Amino acid sequence: MVLLEAAAVLLAVSSVSAWPTTSPYTNVKTRAEQIEAEYDYVIIGGGTSGLTVGDRLSENGKYSVLAIEYGYFDTQTGMNPKRMFNITSKPQPGLNDRTFPVGIGCVVGGSSCVNGQVFLRGTKEEYNAWETLGGGNSTWNWEGLLPYFKKGITLSPPEPVQAKNYNITYDMAYWGTTSKIFGTFGTNYLQPYIKVLYNAMKNMPGIAVPVDSGAGEPGLYWYPISQDPIKYERSYARSGHWDDLNRGNYEMLVGAKVTNILFDGTTATGVTFTSRNSSDTPPAQVKARRQVILAAGAVHTPQILMRSGIGPSPLLKDADIPVLVDLPGVGSNFQDHSYIRNIAYSWGTTPTDSDLDLELFNKPRDIIAARAPGGGAPSLAAMIGLPVVTPDKYEALAQAYESQDPAAYLPSNYEETQIEGYKQQQKVWAKLMRSTNPVFLEIMLHGPGGAIQNLHCMSRGTILMDPKDPDGEMQVDYRAASNPVDVDVMVEMIKFMRRYMTTGDLAQYEAKESLPGSNIITDSELAAWAKEQIIPSVYHPIGTAAKMPREWGGVVDEDLQVYGTTNLTIIDASIMPTIVGATTSMTVYAVAEKAADIIKARTGWD
């Protein structure tokens, strides 16, 4: 995930271009006067979750749906300034006051249009943690989400000969066959040394080899990317949930910014929006007969709630916004994955063809080369639990974490319910730090060394409005490394990479370390180096409108309705109470599929 997503990090710091690319669809609107005054469902956001739910709610043709998207259509995909918001984080004291780009999509299809296409899901215990944090009788767990992973994703199997020779296994029990969102294994041939890396990791103590990357287990496995298996083009929310529909009851307004939600008392009735391109155009409104659905993502969903009077009352009062519902958790509980870009090694003795079974290597290469290869080579990752990362230290790390005062490393403005919510998370994750199932460390295997990712940071950030400029861009504060356990865990991950590269099967190649360097030895030296290197985001923001009990700082209930309101539902990554040990796009699809069924049941959809 780092290779594809972080390589283009610097692109995101440029300004977003306003380029209303022409859409071929008559049901795509660009001006307020082109839309109806009222729809059954109004969706704020035409990204990953918004388009998924819009597709499902409009599929029987009975109900009208409008998705309002700030971005535009684009004929291309991938990271590019014109397809991304221009947001820079606040300086991070825990990372030597560095600032970082906040990478989120600003285009029809949202972040699924610009991400690195790494298509992974979390583990069973990571989703079961959502159940524990959801209060009693929650169905937000592995078993409750698996049907929606299957509904939301179609897997295209790997090339058979290559799969046999490289142990690229899969199990269709974890995948569906009907969705137009695809997970695909590349078909290009693999470099010979990949078998050396594979076997070396497989033989590391404690490393399992699950049958499928989607089985909810950690270990060493090949994983699909979000790609059409025929066209070898990106498979994303627009291609899967908009392009081939062209339904008269499903419209999209692009280039429009939703400023606030309309209410009759505490019942959501519609939204107010403005044109992105014309400051002279007055605000307009559209009404929702059945439901207002918020799908603006973990950065902008809190902003729309706050501008509508839903959020922490002290902040709203500072911004002169009348308080409709005091929900302190709006904009807090912010999480992302963090990583170090390169633990750098070079081979002392390069693995050669003599180290490999050339018959097995050349046979699939020749077969695949005989046709037009596409989609790149299959991708390989090691997804590792903390007890495997550091067998000697994981218990001490878990004890240190669970002994912390829950408020000790949280933002100073957290109030009692938010502190209680983190206390509950602390209980869950102190236990999961002792389990091999949750994935803490991710390593993409592609050569000597490489990036390491911490997929479960215990620090919590905030995404809040500037009370002096409520309509301006959000203030994103990762608060990275504010909890010292995150740096301690990263140190152990560096040490794991060192063991992998210099012991066991790879010892014979006498790899030389250049970063951090063999002169960086002690834990304190490694920690100091890590603080200079850690990047606090892999562009996977979650958690800022969490599905937890209100008394734990939650924002939405079991059915994703915003506390204290009716007819207002959130369906995006902001509802995740804790982050999963995987890229987030597949989980967002599953959340959206489940949310669609919940909304259908609640609103009498038939």
Image: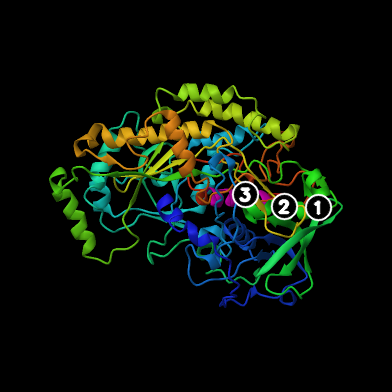
For the point 43% across and 52% down, the residue is 118
Q: Are marks 2 and 1 in contact (CB under 8 Å)?
A: yes
Across and down, in percent, residue 389 comes to 40, 31
Specify the amino acid type for callout 1.
Answer: Ala
Residue, disc 1: 319
Secondary structure type for disc 3: loop
Question: Which residue is nearer to you in this view: 228 or 537?
Answer: 537
Given the current orientation, which residue lies at the most extreme front position?
A: 519
| Quadrant occupied by the C terminus | bottom right
Hey, which quadrant is residue 365 in on the image?
bottom left
Q: Is residue 133 magenta?
A: no
Residue, disc 2: 465
When the figure is inspected, residue 43 is found, relative to residue 593, above or below; the finding is below
- The part of the chain drawn in magenta is 587-600
Secondary structure type for disc 2: loop
> Mark 1 or mark 3, which is nearer the start of the sequence?
3
Across and down, in percent, residue 528 comes to 47, 36
Residue, disc 3: 90
